Amino acid sequence: MSERRIPLAGVIGDPIEHSLSPRLHGHWLRTNLIPGFYIPMRVSNEDFAQVIRTLPKAGFVGVNVTIPHKETALNMADTVTDRAALIGAANTLIFRPDGKIYADNTDGYGFTENLRQGAPDWAPETGPAAVFGAGGAARAVIASLIEVGVPEIRLANRTRARSDALRAEFGNRIKVFDWLQAGNMLDEATTAVNTTSLGMVGKPDFRVPLDGFNPKAVVTDLVYTPLRTHFLEEAEKAGCATVDGLGMLLHQAVPGFERWFGLRPVVDDALRNAVLGP
């Protein structure tokens, strides 16, 4: 009888050098004494499909998928979760023993779990949410805000057409604002989210006026380099509860790790320190 293979997983993107996922999963593997490995892989668009079909033969049980492969991964899968189909992209693939590829998107799960852990009093159903940006991350955020019962989602993007497209897709709960009026979305909003790259190290500043924060709002920024962005600093000055974006990365990794390695890992300070460490 052959010995059971050591399970392998990893993350595929292009580029991939910046990914914190190997530190994250490596910490869980070490602290739970699991014999397995998690490997970063830089794969081009041209090679992606061939690589995905080859990995199970090499002992891989699944992979995370990041830019620019999330849509391709979804289209390659044999089985797709409802939330991945709704978002239109996959970030987690599971290679099943029968050879089928199962695709999920855990970004929305990571978003809501991060807010629940970082702001335990968050009550999303109590008021509108203001969402800045209308890219792939915004799709996951909007889908999860609808799922947790936010009554109205105010949406603004530098290119309005992308906001209008999301409204057409997600329905009348979305109220679109022009980017020049985006600061007005904060009025009485009880949740505020920056899904854009504005404010990230190496990216343009977040220049929308932020003097309208509701002190009762829970505010989060998906940017986590730096951890304390201008968006979060202004929210803190207004008295808001703030949650940094690193937790979304940590929480979105939980379902995949559990499926690949058979143990549900914990998101705690030790994990944050391991991911942020030198």
Image (cartoon, rainbow, N blue to C red):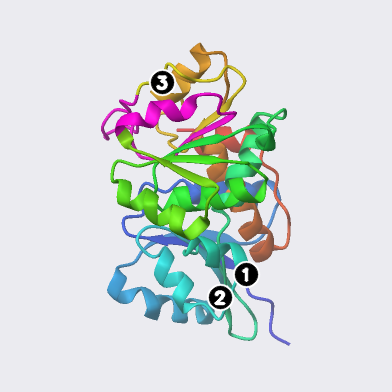
* Residue 66, percent from left and from top: 42, 58
Residue that lies at the very extreme toward the front in this rendered image: 172
Q: Quadrant of the N terminus?
A: bottom right
At label 3, the amino acid type is Leu
Q: Are marks 2 and 1 in contact (CB under 8 Å)?
A: yes
Q: Amino acid at mark 2?
A: Gly
Q: Nearer the viewer, mark 3 or mark 2?
A: 3
Position of 142 relative to 50 (above/below): above
3D distance between C-alphas at marks 1 and 3: 50 Å
**Quarter of the image holding residue 209?**
top left
Span highlighted in magenta in the image: 180-208
Helix, strand or loop status at disc 1:
loop
The residue positioned 39% from the left and 22% from the top of the image is: 230
First reached walking from the N terminus: tag 3 or tag 2: 2
Instruction: Mark 2 or mark 1: name the one nearer the start of the chain.
Output: 1
Q: Which mark is residue 6?
A: 1
Q: Is residue 128 left or right of residue 196?
A: right
What percent of the width, then of the height, locates residue 243? 56, 29
Query: What residue is shown at x 42% (from left), y 25% (from top)?
Result: 231
Image x and y of residue 21, in percent: 50, 50
> Could you classify mark 3 by the number of other residues whose Cα lies within 10 Å: few (under 14), some (14-19), or many (20 or more)?
some
In this rendering, does residue 223 appear at all?
Answer: yes
- Mark 2 secondary-structure assignment: loop
- At 66% from the left and 36% from the top, the residue drawn is 124
Which corner quadrant of the image does residue 194 belong to?
top left
**Residue at the spot of label 2:** 59
Disc 3 target residue: 210
